[in-house]
Image (cartoon, coloured by chain):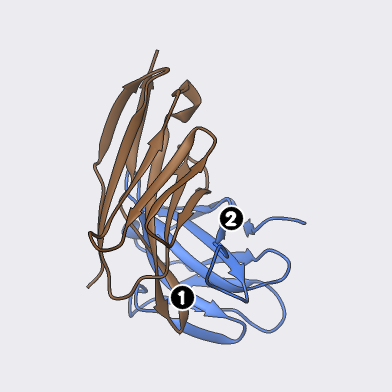
């Protein structure tokens, strides 16, 4: 059973370009979470999605950032018109449909975004 | 509001025991999780507490007191490979659930 997959692992963009980060959850998982981590800091919650639904986007900046989890295919975190402050590691995590109990989330390897 | 506090850094000696504390104030509670994160890598799950008391798992144990909003992670017989960040996270209701993370505690194990 493959783990959570993220690609690309490293992404370099110039200011003003768009960044697209992809996350394929573990097989059988229908809940996806996106987090941002700055160097030497903890994980900041961004958005929580289930298939075709955004459940909680309270941690996502109101502008330039969007996320989706379509019926088919990976979850996408999209950052438009990137700025240097967007440089960070972006982690995706997934959990089973039956949340609660010991149904913890499992993390992907992350995408390290560098904005020049 | 949601607030989780952990010490920023700790240092301990190989073979020793170290306790990493976590206090939390969240709107709702459905379990407390500890994760280990080595530099440049993804967090990996260590332990889970939802009821008060101690959960033991080999060299690692985790304790929870819900009335005090307090947990600790206890690492015994420290090894050099335990040098990492340790993240405390609380699962809270949100639709189904979401996870709020502390800033993490960087542990350095010295020879």
State the SS at label 2: loop
Mark seen at residue B70 = none
Q: Residue at x 33, y 80 (%)?
A: A62
Residue assigned mark 2: A108
Question: How many angstroms separate mark 1 from mark 2 (CA)?
Answer: 19 Å
Q: Does B103 sit left or right of B44 as displayed?
A: left
The spot of residue B3 in percent (x, y) is 24, 63
**Residue nearest the observer in this picture, B48 or B86:** B48
Residue assigned mark 1: B97
**Residue nearest the observer in this picture, B51 or A1:** B51
Q: Is residue B66 above or below residue B93?
A: above
State the SS at label 1: strand
Chain for colour blue: A
One can see residue A116 in this view:
no
Q: Chain of mark 1?
A: B
Q: Quadrant of residue B89?
A: bottom left
Marks 1/2 in contact by CB < 8 Å: the verdict is no
Mark 2 neighbour class, 10 Å CA radius: few under 14, some 14 to 19, many 20 or more: many
Check the picture and name the quadrant holding the N terminus of chain A. Answer: bottom right
The spot of residue A94 in percent (x, y) is 58, 66
Q: Chain of mark 2?
A: A
One can see residue B76 in this view:
yes
**Residue nearest the observer in this picture, B101 or A46:** B101
Q: Residue at x 47, y 58 (%)?
A: A90
Q: Quadrant of residue A50?
A: bottom right
């Amino acid at each position: 059973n493959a783990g959570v997959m993220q690609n690309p692992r490293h992404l370099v963009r110039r200011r003003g370009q768009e960044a697209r980060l992809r996350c394929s959850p573990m097989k059988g998982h229908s809940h996806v979470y996106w987090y941002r981590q700055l160097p030497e800091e903890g994980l900041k919650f961004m958005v929580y999605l289930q298939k075709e639904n955004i459940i909680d986007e309270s941690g996502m900046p109101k502008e330039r950032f969007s996320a989706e989890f379509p019926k088919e295919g990976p979850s996408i975190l999209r950052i438009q018109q990137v700025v240097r402050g967007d440089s960070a590691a972006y982690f995706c995590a997934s959990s089973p449909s039956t949340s609660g109990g010991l149904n913890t989330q499992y993390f992907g390897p992350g995408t390290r975004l560098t904005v020049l | 509001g949601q607030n989780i506090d952990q010490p920023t850094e700790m240092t301990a000696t190989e073979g020793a025991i170290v306790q990493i504390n976590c206090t939390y104030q969240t709107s709702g509670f459905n379990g407390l999780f500890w994760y280990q994160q080595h530099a440049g890598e993804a967090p990996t799950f260590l332990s889970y507490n939802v009821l008060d008391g101690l959960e033991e798992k080999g060299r690692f144990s985790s304790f929870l007191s819900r009335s005090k909003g307090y947990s600790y992670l206890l690492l015994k017989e420290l090894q050099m490979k335990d040098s990492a960040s340790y993240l405390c996270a609380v699962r809270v209701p949100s639709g189904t659930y979401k996870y709020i993370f502390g800033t993490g505690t960087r542990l350095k194990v010295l020879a």
